[in-house]
Amino acid sequence: MNIEKKDPGMQYILSKHILKHLLLKGVITEDEYKRIDKENIKNLEQ
């Protein structure tokens, strides 16, 4: 099933969830989390 083609909002929520998980695990820093989140929001608005 291809979620991203159906609903970009759902894709955003999913990627934010994954980002939060990476942040909690210490894979990415909070700055990286915020930067990627901003990019995702920008992509969502296109």
Image (cartoon, rainbow, N blue to C red):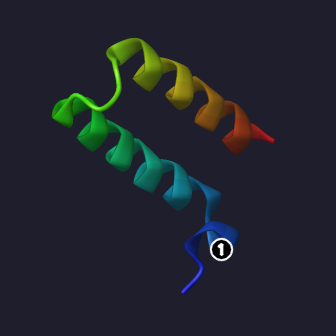
Q: Is residue 31 above or below residue 25?
A: above
Snapshot quadrant of residue 9: bottom right
The quadrant of the picture occupied by the N terminus is bottom right
Q: Which residue is mark 1?
A: 6
Q: Is residue 40 above or below residue 28?
A: below
Quick one: label 1, few (<14), some, or many (20+) residues within 10 Å?
few
User: In this view, which residue lies farthest toward the bottom?
Assistant: 1
Relative horizontal placement of residue 19, taking residue 23 as reference (left or right): right
Relative image position of residue 42 (x, y in whole percent): 70, 31
Relative image position of residue 10 (x, y in whole percent): 50, 60
Q: Residue at x 61, y 66 (%)?
A: 7
Snapshot quadrant of residue 41: top right
User: In this view, which residue lies farthest toward the right?
Assistant: 46
Q: Residue at x 81, y 42 (%)?
A: 46
Relative image position of residue 3 (x, y in whole percent): 56, 73
Q: Is residue 37 above or below residue 5?
A: above
Relative image position of residue 28 (x, y in whole percent): 35, 27
Snapshot quadrant of residue 20: top left
User: In this view, which residue lies farthest toward the left?
Assistant: 25
User: In this view, which residue lies farthest toward the top?
Assistant: 31
* SS for callout 1: helix
In the image, what residue type sits under mark 1? Lys
